Amino acid sequence: LTEHRQRKGEPKPPANEGRTNLYHLTVEFQGYLCREEGVSYAKGELARDQIQQYILERYAGKLSGNDDRWETRKTGRKAHASTPVHLLCPDRDTLDRYLVGLLRFFSSQPYKAAALFEMLPAWLRFLEARELIDAGQRDRTLHELSSLIPDLIKVWDNFRLDPALRLAAERWRENAGLRSES
């Protein structure tokens, strides 16, 4: 194997081995998105970066349920603690917290949030194709994450400048291979 040479403008891989492995896995995912899923390079890079950041923040405990103020205010009830079954698979609670962080009023980053959520079914297919998860884990994760769709649709309804964001959320179940809820 030859050492990877960093190209101009390419993000620098993280310093420790776990971060480096995650970085390389997400770069491989970006290639998969372009080749296998027909996703543009720009959208793939946005999703790749957000998946990597989400996993790193969750692993570092930054998305733990220690501060339930948001969940209580949003739903009127406290969030239930869910432990990810697999390090590379998102769980509903921490993903919800991460998306909320991307969509805060003063630092709103709707395209990052949309790319992350929209590409999660492809991320899980990629992990399954690489035998890092099995079909059962993929399906369980997709079903758990699908409960975020109604909240995201409400968010995209308020972001009327780009109706494609709402449309992507509406088509998420289909993209994930799940039956639509009636």
Image: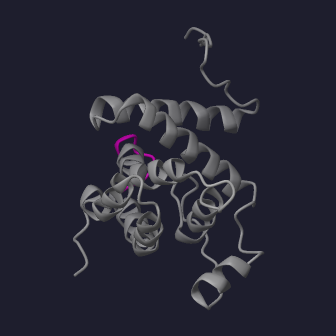
> What span is colored magenta in the figure?
129-134
Q: Position of residue 129 (x, y in %)?
A: 34, 42
Query: Closer to the camera, 14 or 156?
Result: 156
Q: Main secondary structure of the magenta part?
A: loop
Residue with the most extreme bottom position: 76
Which residue is located at x 39 percent, y 70 percent?
146
Query: Closer to the camera, 172 or 3?
Result: 172
Indicate the quadrant containing the N terminus: top left, top right, bottom left or bottom right: top right
Is residue 79 visible in the rendered structure shown here?
A: no
Q: Position of residue 180 (x, y in %)?
A: 23, 72
Is residue 59 visible in the rendered structure shown here?
A: yes
| Horizontal side, residue 95 vs residue 28: left or right | right
Q: Position of residue 58 (x, y in %)?
A: 67, 57
Indicate the quadrant containing the C terminus: top left, top right, bottom left or bottom right: bottom left
Q: Position of residue 17 (x, y in %)?
A: 71, 33
Which residue is located at x 59 percent, y 12 percent?
7
Please check the rendered image and state whether residue 31 is part of the magenta-colored stretch, yes or no.
no
Q: Quadrant of residue 70?
A: bottom right
| Horizontal side, residue 106 vs residue 171: left or right | right
Which residue is located at x 62 percent, y 51 percent?
55
Which residue is located at x 56 percent, y 30 percent?
24
